[in-house]
Image (cartoon, rainbow, N blue to C red):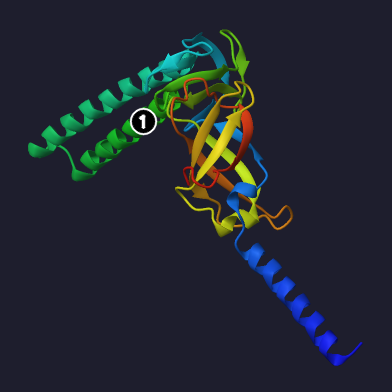
Amino acid sequence: MNMKKVIGMASLLFLGLAGAAQGQSSPDPGAQAPVRFLVVADREAPLSAVAGGRVARVYAQLGDSVAKGKVLVSLDCSDLDAKRDAAEAEYKAAQLRYEAKAKLQGLQSAAALEVELTAADVNRTRSQVRIFAAELAQCRFVAPFNGRVARVHVKEGQGVAPGAPIVDLVGTGTPKARLNVPSSWIAWLRPGAHLEASVDETGEHYVLTVTRLSGRVDAVSQTIEIEADFLGDTSRVLPGMSGRASPAKPGGKG
């Protein structure tokens, strides 16, 4: 083989490798394989018990729509009620003693130390009232936002331990899709990019708008986690559903 043929073959090989490298640096989004996604609620609140007790009332049931501030479950805290009442009575008595001592001091019939001691007693008893009020607040499980009851873990009369789940609440806003996509998508993926998606449970098709990208790539799977919002009517899309998503085809949204 003469030198000209060798040089010619080397040139062709070089051009082929360069073309392949150029093709890899500019991937076609539409040619990417679809990936699985999970539907998650816009907001979630798994309410759990801070202190142990017995369930007195369950005010919400599975699937109920509840407004922010609504009491969902309450525990029997009659003993704390009694302690708070006793603390409030002691606080009022301390206030009366302080007022009496302050008047006597004005008449020069009470020492300044006596007035200071009664004032300290007022602060101590007021703190006790606040402590019992905080503990009583833990006996009521209140909806932190407008939402729907996803699950009720307890029944009336049931005893619960600290940390036990009570109610799961999900928001009623637009659901999100959470998915792990190949890290190679970063070449074109950005907030505002669109994906085409289908939900397995309903068979319906949607457009997703990418809203968030993780700050790192998983070194093992070479994927990056992203979140995307559903566009259009999502009344039939529920948290926990799943499906497949792929980059929007060229010429479509994206």
Say which amino acid is labelled 1: Arg
| Picture coordinates of residue 202, whole percent (x, y) | 60, 20
| Picture coordinates of residue 213, whole percent (x, y) | 53, 51
Q: How crowded is mark 1: few (under 14 residues within 10 Å), some or many (20 or more)?
A: some
Q: In this view, does 63 lie to the left or right of 4?
A: left
**Rendered view: 206 above or below 86:** below
Residue at coordinates 26% horizontally, 36% vertically from top-left? Answer: 118
Q: Nearer the viewer, residue 23 or 117?
A: 23
Q: Is residue 128 left or right of residue 163?
A: left
Q: Is residue 50 left or right of residue 8?
A: left
Residue at coordinates 73% horizontally, 52% vertically from top-left? Answer: 221
Q: Kindly indicate the quadrant of the structure image that contains residue 156.
A: top right
Q: Which of 21 and 165 is in front in this view?
A: 21
Q: Kindly indicate the quadrant of the structure image that contains residue 178.
A: top right
Q: Nearer the viewer, residue 160 or 217?
A: 217
- Badge 1 marks a residue whose secondary structure is helix
Give the quarter of the figure containing the N terminus.
Answer: bottom right
Residue at coordinates 59% horizontally, 51% vertically from top-left? Answer: 29
**Rendered view: 132 above or below 33:** above
Q: Mark 1 points at which residue?
A: 130
Q: Extreme right residue here? A: 1
Question: Is residue 202 in sight in this rendering?
Answer: yes
Q: Is residue 178 left or right of residue 140?
A: right
